[in-house]
Amino acid sequence: MSTNRFVDNGDGTVTDTLTKLMWMKNDSYLDLLKFVTHPAATKYLNKKNEEAFAGKADWRMPNKREAHSLFDMDKEVQDKYEMTIHIDPVFTQGCGYDTWTSHVRGKITAYCYSFNSGTGGHKESADTLNSSVRLVRGEFDNSKT
């Protein structure tokens, strides 16, 4: 019997049964129809918590490890540009190809993780680089990873 790692909760969220994290099914690009800077991603996060998205007010940006936990080379979804990214198809197609994370270095760079390549790096986080963010909640359970 095959079980799916990711469960669509029917309320705009997806639960990862391996890590026990809950993810937003849509990323910021799908909600806003534009890419955002890291500061704008923080504003998006604050707005989702203020409105208690899916009845929860403890959404946050993923850390690097959490973002990487979504990457699966055997899974494919088409991003906004119809390029292949490697996340489970339970997540909505047409999303951004990467996500901002909570990892920042000083005031000018933040870590951005690519679902296309499975890698990431620090990028300028000010008003010059736009990306998307996929919000998460819960604590990473690494007992099965």
Image (tube, rainbow, N blue to C red):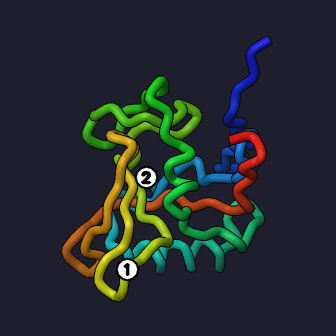
Q: Quadrant of residue 76?
A: top left
Q: Give me the disc on residue 135.
A: none
For the point 47% across and 23% down, the residue is 74
Residue 8, image x, y percentages: 69, 38
Locate the C terminus by quadrant.
Answer: top right
Residue 30: mark: 2
Q: Is residue 34 above or below residue 97?
A: below
Q: Which mark is residue 105?
A: 1
Q: Is residue 35 left or right of residue 43?
A: left
Q: Which quadrant does the N terminus fall into?
A: top right
How far, Cα to Cα, is label 2 from label 1? 27 Å
State the residue at coordinates (48%, 54%): 27
Residue closest to the far bottom: 107
Q: Secondary structure at mark 1?
A: strand
Identity of the amino acid at label 1? Arg
Q: Nearer the viewer, residue 25 or 126?
A: 126
Q: Nearer the viewer, mark 2 or mark 1?
A: 1
Foreground residue among 123 and 22:
123
Tally of numbered discs: 2
Furthest-top residue in this view = 1
Amino acid at pointer 2: Leu
Residue for point 69% across, 53% down = 22
Q: Position of residue 138 (x, y in %)?
A: 73, 61
